Amino acid sequence: MGFFEKLLKIDRRVIFIFIAIAIALPLFFEVTMHIDITPVVRGVYDTVEALPSGSKVLISFDYDPGSMPELQPMAESVLRHCFSKDLKLVIMGLWPQGPLQANWALEIILNEPDIKEKNLKYGIDYVNLGYIAGGEVVIQRLGSDIHAAFPADYYGTPIDEIPLMKGVQNFSNIDFVYNLSAGYPGTTEWVQFAVDRFHAKLGAGNTAVQAPLMYPYINTGQLVGLLGGMKGAAEYEILAKRPARAVRYMFGQGVSHAVVIFFVIVGNIAYFATRKKRKES
Amino acid sequence: MHLTPDIGIWIGGLLTLGIFSFLYGDNPYYKFCEALFIGVSAGHWFVTLFWTVFVAKMIRNVEIGLNTFITQGFSAGMADYMHWSYIFGGILGFLMLLRLFPKIGWISRWSLAFVVGTTSGYYFITYLVSNGLRQIQRTILPLYVHGDFYTTIGNLIIIVGTFCGLTYFFFSKEHKGTFGGLARLGIWFLMITFGASFGYTVMSRMSLLIGRMDYIFGTWLGMLG
């Protein structure tokens, strides 16, 4: 058996080991990759940046722990950006675990020194409305009456008793909607109901798998911008001048992608080099 | 190295290794972790849906509706249909469970028919507007934008790509000659789209692996700074 035939019959576990090393090893080094800022990420950043202090932002956490490595850094960066600009945050989730993801992100961001010194208060500066079943029907309900959709917040406090929610009746009282999505219900439903029916201004952060499906919504202006996967999160961290987890993880992304590309090239060379022999046999 | 004393993180770390062990080959450790994951997920979803849908939506609303009947009389109760009408959802849900009894299982089709019918109607307009009309509208672009070379190129790519992509899916005419050439160009656009999607998928999977590695080496073993 020739060299190329051996390459084609390589045990897949060897490739697994290479990938594992390519992912794990970079975690031990503090290497910052050069990351270009794409217009779609800048779209979200510029929209948040342009909001005047006190504007109300609705953030929907539509994902669960399975998508944390991609979406949690996005959540943290956007929360940090919003709090640093003194925006008022209304948090909710169309996925049962979404509000819990929000609380994890809040716990980290609210304890960062510059945010902590703002002495932000629950119910005044931010509120977590929790999860409610119904998917896109909930979005439609938010368009008419948020108080009817969420009678109480995550902790059971009646929404009418929360100062931040006074005067927030529907999307017309929300200046920007940001959706973190890992599937259904997610960005597609927010576009269809919040944007096209109630004319809300929407930005999104998506897992990389579904990000390509959202690009048509950017071209039409249905989305102001999109953070796609870990790269999108890293770009946002750089724009906000607060490189954090996503930027650190991007080195591992780069190395692992290089290994995948290497194996694709080697596999193709071996395939074409042995093609003639295979035909003859 | 700074091992965590948190028992929950230890369980998470050991279960992660158990799932990874499948990469070497199927084994009892993996089977245990898989069964545990499926069991916990099923239990979690059952409890979540019971409290957020069955109790929060149906029981509470029907309770309010019945209360109106009892305290304010029949006509006030009837007027409060927004609450008691949830009982119909409950009945449809109950009919779904009849699938468990083969002899009367056919009744569950009524619920399915209702779900399929309402969903189709509900989505017809939203998809037509958001994913159809708005997208078509955005492809009606000028072929030449004076003084803006990149926009001109971008517009041409969108127009040609959309047209050729649609041509490929037109099967009423044989893909031969000029028509066949346009269809082949359409395939190229489709392949580039699939390639971009695949690239994003690779990034997504790597991200998940990075997350797990960070958990093992950082959160669990305390080896990362």
Image (cartoon, helix red, strand yellow):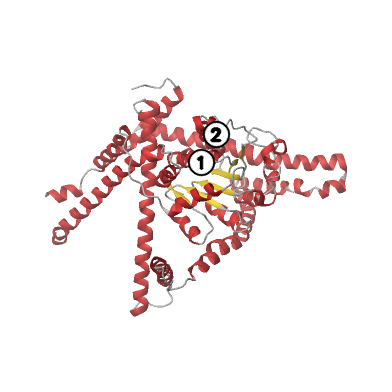
Q: Residue B212, image x and y in percent?
A: 38, 35
User: Of A182 and A238, which appears nearest the observer?
Assistant: A238
Residue sitting at the far left: A2
- The kind of secondary structure element at disc 2 is helix
Q: Residue A251, image x and y in percent?
A: 32, 41
| Residue at 60% in and 51% down | A136
Picture layout, residue B128 above or below residue A52: below
**Mark 1 neighbour density, 10 Å: few (under 14) some (14–19) many (20 or more):** many
**Mark 2 neighbour density, 10 Å: few (under 14) some (14–19) many (20 or more):** some
Q: Residue A113, image x and y in percent?
A: 50, 29
Q: In this rendering, which labeled residue sits more in front, label 1 or label 2?
A: 1
Dot 2 amino acid type: Asn
User: Of B133 and A79, which appears nearest the observer?
Assistant: A79
Picture quarter containing residue B21?
top left
Q: Which residue is mark 1?
A: A81
Dot 1 amino acid type: His
Quarter of the image where the N terminus of chain B is located: top left
Rounded to the nearest angstrom, the CA distance separating label 1 from label 2 is 16 Å
Label 1 is found on which chain of the structure? A
| Residue at 55% in and 61% down | B130
Picture quarter containing residue B97?
top right
| Residue at 71% in and 39% down | B59
Q: Which residue is mark 2?
A: A103
**Which mark is first along the chain, 2 or 1?**
1
